[in-house]
Image: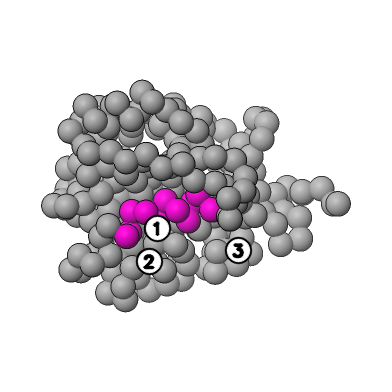
Amino acid sequence: MAKLSEIDTAAIPGGRGHLRLLQRDDEFSIRIAGKPGELMNTRLHGSEDALAELACARVAAHPAVRVLVGGLGMGFTLAAALKSLPAQAEVVVAELVPGVVEWNRGPLGAAAGYPINDPRCRIIVDDVVAVLEQHPGAFDAIMLDVDNGPEGLTRKDNDRLYNAKGLQTIQEALRPEGVVAVWSAGMDPAFSERLKRAGLCVEEHTVRAHRPGKGARHTIWLGW
């Protein structure tokens, strides 16, 4: 089998290194330059789909539903959200790395069906924390696939999204009866407790990276 070949890189704002985009035929991989392993792969997106499906199932019937996806990635969470929501919904995506948006406008976007071209989608190139702070009481659901989960990997600054102050900012950005969903590469009992201390009711779901029932086990928290 041919090796994945690097086709582009994208700087992570704040001087925190680069992301690498690799391709082999119709398979794409995103990795952090200088670090082993990969952040995501177009063959393995079951848990990214589940992030949107679990959150949107709770709010799809809300009038004029509006949701936020934190982290565009390869577009699978966005695509699943659009499939789960009605025609009048709005899906806002906050993506920190401009290059990731451009990758999704290019050949990478085909894997998820180019969801960023859906008229219900609006892309904001900014830190998701800033977007949350600028939109109090704006979202029925907030779906966060930022970094590797509650423990920052690509940017330690991401910790401020998942600490007590960050959780307060998230709650303030939710509409009544809203829900937050958080993706993680693994379990984190301390984060479950942090959500509860923030006053949220919490569900913890174990989902597989590749459906049906295959691949690594990832964790999704729902809080409301």
For this rendering, which residue is in front, 202 or 130?
A: 202
- In the picture, the disc for residue 111 is 3
* Camera sees residue 98: no
Asked whether the residues under the numbered discs 2 and 1 touch, taking CB atoms below 8 Å apart as contact, a structural biologist would say yes
Q: Earlier in the sequence, mark 2 or mark 1?
A: 1
* Residue 202, placed above or below residue 2: above
Tell me the amino acid under the disc marked 3. Ala
Tell me the amino acid under the disc marked 2. Ser
For label 1, the crowd category at 10 Å Cα-Cα, with few meaning under 14, some 14 to 19 and many 20 or more, is: some
Tell me the amino acid under the disc marked 1. Glu
What number of labels is visible?
Answer: 3
The residue drawn where x is 20% and y is 65% is 62
- Lateral position of residue 24 relative to residue 92, left or right: right
- Lateral position of residue 35 relative to residue 25, left or right: left
Q: Earlier in the sequence, mark 2 or mark 3?
A: 2
Q: Secondary structure at mark 3?
A: helix
Query: Is residue 53 highlighted in magenta?
Result: yes
For this rendering, which residue is in front, 93 or 204?
A: 204
* Residue 62, placed above or below residue 22: below
* Residue 28, placed above or below residue 113: above
- In the picture, the disc for residue 84 is 2
Residue 203 in which image quadrant: top left
Depth check, mark 3 against mark 1: the one in front is 1
Disc 3 from disc 1: Cα separation: 18 Å
